[in-house]
Amino acid sequence: MGPVELLHMSVFSQSFSPCGRFLAAGNNYGEIAVFSLSAALSPDASQASQKPILNFTAHDGPVFSLLSTDTHLLSAGNGEISAWSWAELIKKSTKAAWTRKPSYETSLEIPEINAMIINPKDNSLIVGGGDNNIHIMDMETGIFKSVLKGHTDYIHCLCFKEREEEILSGGEDGAVRIWGHTEILLSHFQTCSGMASQECARPQFGKWISCLATDSDWMLCGGGPSLSLWHLRSMSPTSVFPLPGCQREAVFYQDLIMSVGEGPHVSHCLHGGTVKAQIPCTPSSLNTLALNLKNTEHRVMTVGGSSHQIDVFTNFSYRAFSLSF
Amino acid sequence: MSSDAVKKRKPKVIRNEAGTPETKRGRAEGEQSVEMEERRRQCSVHFITLKKLNRLAHMRLKKGRDQTHEAKQRVDVLHLQLQNLLYEVMHLQKEISKCLEFKSQHEEIELVSEEEFFQEAPAEISRPHVTRDDHHQLTLARLDWELEQRKRLAEQYKMSLARKEKIHKAIEQKREYLSSLQPGLQNIMQASLPVQECLSMPFEQMQKQAEVARHLPPPLYVLLVQAAAYGQACDKTLSASISGDVDEAKALSRPPEDSQDDESDSDAEEEQQNTKRRRASVGVQLDDKRKEMLRRHPLSLCVDLKCKDGSVLHLFFYYLMNLNILTVKTKVSTTTDLSGAVSAGELLNSESLLNCLYASDHGQETPNPTNRYQFDKVGITTFADYVSDLGHPYVWVQKLGGLQFSSDGAQVCVLMGSALSASHMERTMKLLQGRLQARLALHKQFSSLEHSIIPISGECQHLFPAKVVSGLTLVPVEQELGFVQHVLKAGLLRETDLFFMAVVERGTARLLAAVVVNPRYPEVMPLFSLSLHWKGERSGRTEDNLRAMESEVNMFRAELQGPRPGLQLLTNQIQRLCVCLDVYLETESQVCDGSEGPKEFPREKMCLRTARGPSRLKPFKYNHPQGFFSHR
């Protein structure tokens, strides 16, 4: 990895291990690096502990999405999903447990996979990507059971409402679709397009939706339009956040909303619509934000974006140090 | 006394006479006069007795004096005798001591030891029966023996001298004979010159060179030998020759005369310095010392490397005697006239032509660590000031001359001298030729880039689509550029790098590209940093698509370098940049300020998808025969 390659590296996805002591990050060269959080956070941490303990090439194309189950790390490359056992990764073995491809119609260009989520109730993996469709795969058998079609442009993000078992998807076409029980294809859907409500629309950027998050009744969505908080039952935006760039990922955390996107900062916002703080960080724009809530000792927030460095926040108000690829 | 007596008589007489008249007067008075006579007679007798006593006293005194005088004289005589004797004693003592201290010359003669003497000397000289007892005789005998031996050896010496004279004469005669042959041989050599040229075996030239080469300092000699050997074996176009003042070199290498010359020279120098001291200060002295320290050997080596297109790289190697390092100066001569490329003035500048031939070999500091201490003595702080004058002391030049200096971080090299030179020769020569070709190609490319023509060779056409609309101009770099900061932070920009700015324009859009070209181009790819002025200013730092364009141009060396040796790299990169700008502008669907209307740049490039991935990147990758753009 010469200095020019490091200069042009972008981190697209992160995932914490089930025990919470390790962080896996995927970059645009198709590599996955596993960092040891316990080493990096320990009092005698050095430069070397901010380097990955394992760095391997997982896919040909960029790794846009990483997801951790209880035992495995799932990574999405160019049209394929690979699973890696966390126990094996910690022992530095880089053999994939399995690799599966959803069936695609076009063959000229392999569509990427942008988002993956898990439905814990029926143990299925929901995947959305460049072919404008959502594929659902059964984790035990590995068969792709259903395809949800409806978007007219590729899918940026997915999220899952656990209480009603509904899938929300946002795409390049600017629509947010809500999919009901997955045993029936397209049972009912509703679209709420950012363009419809003028308050959050930003035509100078576009209409795509690149981030979705849900907290049972509330939904956050943003991208081309401003980041806004919607009340799902009434399908109307309650607050619009005045953030300058396009947001790429947003999460609910306690009573705050944290989002990252264009611009070298993490924005902390309140439900009311005010931006409480913008914490500066090293990459010039951010792609991914992850919170390690499983482990109370290593409760950190990590962000990655257009840089080979991943910033780690131990106290969410300031950047503590950076891990580097 | 007699006079007294006479005098006494006279008055008697007188009295008598006087008395007679008076006798008559009185016979009564007669008795009185008889008493008076009696008294007078007694008185005279007393007087006479008194005189007699006086006389006796005088005479006794005189006798006493005479006796004393005599005794004294006797004592004096004895005293003198004593002194004489004492003096003689002293004299004799001195003489004795002188005699005792006397070192006879015979003691200075080294005589053989007694045993040897008794063994070697014949009996009539050694006379053991006498000499064994008598030391004096023994010494005499030894001296005799010494004398005999010396006489014998003197004889032998005379005979040897005579023989030597004879041989000397014989040698002289032979020498004369040989020197008489010399002109004849010269004639033959002269006559053979045309033959040599005809057969292209320049023995004479090589011999002359070898003759001069004998006076080269060792590193230059190693370099000459290795370069000539390499030239003969691998690269017929390489030629090496010696230039400089041979007599000075000869003067330097003559040691015994050198000391005399040194003395006279140093005297002369001292005088000169003395006069100088009267006029100028210590500064001038220091200057002289510096000049002395940085003195070059009068002979230098010139190596010419020819390239296929006829341009020649001239390398002049110099040896700095006191510092024990080699330096090099360069000159490029080309068949075509190189002019016009303003921004490329630096490329063939002899100062920077050979910079970083091997990574981080800048040639600004001397590689010999002992020079640091020498510089401290004469007050030279940086060698870089003298480099333009003396030449660059690159590390590869030292290696070619067989000079190995230990420095931090270098691996321990077991080779020394010629082996070291030979191991580096081929690689260095190839690098030099490559460097010259790369710079010439770059120069040509720059001059055509300045005319806004991007020269793409036939082999590289497949990398680009047929129609590229954006146009290029080169501009000088004016001010600090904000969008290059990330390159500086990553430590990829160094003083030795060439820096220029290209502007690609299409319609109202203007793309500024700051390019950093490493001196080791094309081994190291030039680095582009972009900033787009179109409806606002964006740079690779603020926008992911521009960053993707940067990575499309900066990486993928294998695709962009074209046919070996990869001299098309820069022009291909620039062409790709133009293509990427076309794609960017044509796929930009957003219209600012909500205004509707025809797009400024109609879509001409064929793309399957205009956005992909979470950062919605544009398709910058060109696929060749199909002619469409896709994502990486």
Image: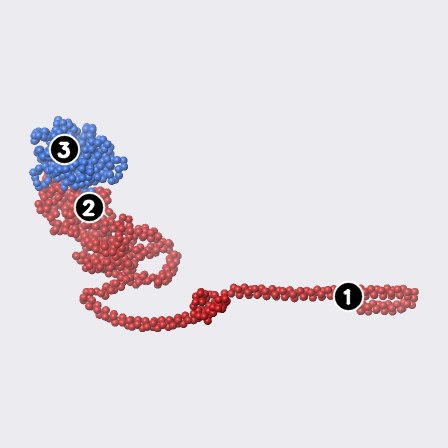
Chain colours: A blue, B red
The answer for which chain carries disc 3 is: A
Cα–Cα span, label 3 and label 1: 182 Å
Q: Quadrant of residue A48?
A: top left
Q: What residue would you read off at disc 3?
A: A117
**Number of numbered discs on residues:** 3
Q: What residue would you read off at disc 1?
A: B55
Cα–Cα span, label 2 and label 1: 157 Å
How crowded is the residue under tag 2: few (<14 C-alpha within 10 Å), some, or many (20+)? many
A129 with respect to A256 (left or right): left
A19 and B533: which is toward the camera: A19
From where the camera sits, is residue B504 visible? Answer: no
Cα–Cα span, label 3 and label 2: 39 Å
The image shows residue B203 at horizontal and vertical percentages of 22, 65
The kind of residue tagged 2 is Leu
Q: Residue at x 20, y 44 (%)?
A: A2
The image shows residue B4 at horizontal and vertical percentages of 81, 67
How crowded is the residue under tag 1: few (<14 C-alpha within 10 Å), some, or many (20+)? few
The kind of residue tagged 3 is Ile
A272 and A32: which is toward the camera: A32
The image shows residue A78 at horizontal and vertical percentages of 12, 39
Q: Which disc number belongs to residue B10?
A: none
B199 and B452: which is toward the camera: B199
* Secondary structure category for the residue under label 1: helix
* Secondary structure category for the residue under label 3: strand
Quick one: quadrant of the N terminus of chain A? top left
How crowded is the residue under tag 3: few (<14 C-alpha within 10 Å), some, or many (20+)? many
Vertical placement of residue A97 versus B92, above or below: above
The kind of residue tagged 1 is Arg
Q: Earlier in the sequence, mark 2 or mark 1?
A: 1
Q: What residue would you read off at disc 2?
A: B527
